Image: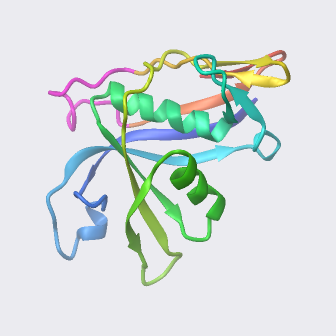
Amino acid sequence: RIVGHVSVREMPLTASGLSAAATASAPQPLTPSAYMSNLHVDQEWRRKPVRDPLTGRRSSLAFELMRECEGVAQSWGYDATWLNVYDHNGLAAKLYTNKLGYEITHTRKPKSGPVFHIMRKQLEALPEPSGLALEPLDGVVQPTSLAAPPIALAQRGRNAPQLLVLQAKQGRRRLRVA
């Protein structure tokens, strides 16, 4: 059973994180960027602690899924990641800004629909991602790493994988990220 997921993909964005559609009336140069979206953790797994095997610290599954995406983005050759969060989603905004270190670069107020913030994080060196298998440890879940296909600098924006979805699955005795 899948208990959480998040997507990371290469997406052409402006220097302020806007998409081509958002700048259609005043086109701006676009460059391939690492963009994360669709973070979701099942209600019963929210705020359940997981343990980082390298540091021993406890965190949430949402935090670990986002860290894995950041590691994937780094393995693809990116030094920053982007995401959007709706203004009314205060818990997600708090996770991104307070816990993960994202900064709001732009706030969009569409003519119709909710207000949202565009966020960016300059990535620091992270452990290499390599096969996330989350296992119970003292009543918590212990993550290991996840492998992702690398994007060579020459491939960025061309034949690079368009989308990678990281999923946390609950097995009989352990939780695995596929």
Which residue is the extreme one toward the bottom? 111
Dividing the picture into quadrants, the one containing residue 169 is: top right
Q: Is residue 49 left or right of residue 52?
A: right
Residue found 18% across the figure and 54% down from its top: 30
Q: Is residue 177 above or below residue 110?
A: above
Q: Which region shows up in magenta? A: 149-162
Question: Which quarter shows the N terminus?
Answer: top right
Residue found 54% across the figure and 18% down from its top: 145
Residue found 48% across the figure and 69% down from its top: 116
Residue 80 part of the magenta segment: no
Residues 141 and 24: in front is 141
Q: Is residue 120 left or right of residue 55?
A: left
- Main SS, magenta residues: loop
Residue 159 part of the magenta segment: yes
Q: Position of residue 80 (x, y in %)?
A: 33, 42
Q: Position of residue 127 (x, y in %)?
A: 45, 21
Residue found 41% across the figure and 71% down from its top: 107
Colour approach in the figure: rainbow
Q: Position of residue 120 (x, y in %)?
A: 38, 52
Q: Is residue 138 above or below residue 164?
A: above
Question: Which quarter shows the C terminus?
Answer: top right
Q: Position of residue 29 (x, y in %)?
A: 14, 58
Q: Is residue 153 visible?
A: yes
